[in-house]
Amino acid sequence: MSGLRAYPMAGWLDPAGVRDAVARWLRLVAADAELAPYLIWVDRARLAGHLALTLTAALDVPADAVAAARRAFANEAGS
C-alpha cells in the first residue's frame, strides 16, 4: 500500500494546497541543520513562488490555477 493513499487528496491541487505543500517543505528544509545553510541570503518568498508555480505546472493543473498561484505569491511577496 502506498503511503500517499493515507492523505486526503481533495483540494490538494488548488493554489492553496500547493502553497501549503511548498510552505511545509520550506519549513522542513529551514529546520534541517544540514540544509538550512543553503537558504542563507535566499529570498524565501520568491523561492516559494517559483516552487509553487513549478509544482503547479508539473501537476498539469489548469492555467487559471497557475495564474491564481502566481498572483497569490506575488501578493505575499509584496511584488
Image (cartoon, helix red, strand yellow):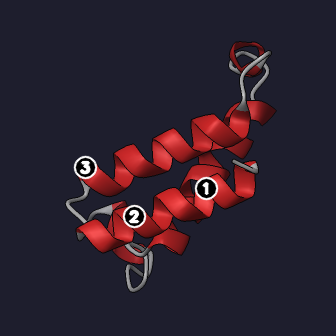
Q: Determine the residue positioned at 28% across, 52% down.
A: 57
Residue 33 placement, left or right of 72: right
Q: Determine the residue positioned at 69% across, 47% down.
A: 79
Q: Earlier in the sequence, mark 1 or mark 2?
A: 2
Q: Which mark is residue 23?
A: none
Give the camera-side residue of 17 and 31: 17
For mark 3, give the secondary structure: helix
Q: Which residue is mark 2?
A: 67
Q: Residue lying at the far bottom in this picture: please name it.
A: 10
Q: Determine the residue positioned at 43% across, 83% down.
A: 11
Q: In the image, residue 23 lies at what x, y percent?
A: 65, 53
Q: In the image, residue 37 lies at what x, y percent?
A: 77, 13
Q: Can the viewer see residue 67?
A: yes
Circles 3 and 2, Cβ within 8 Å, touching? The answer is no
Circles 1 and 3, Cβ within 8 Å, touching? The answer is no
Give the camera-side residue of 38 and 33: 38
- Above/below status of 16 relative to 36: below
Circle nearer the viewer, 1 or 3 = 1
Point out the image quarter for the N terminus. bottom left
Q: Which residue is mark 1?
A: 73
Residue 46 placement, left or right of 53: right
Q: Amino acid at mark 3?
A: Ala
Q: In the image, residue 61 lies at what x, y percent?
A: 25, 66
Q: Amino acid at mark 2?
A: Ala
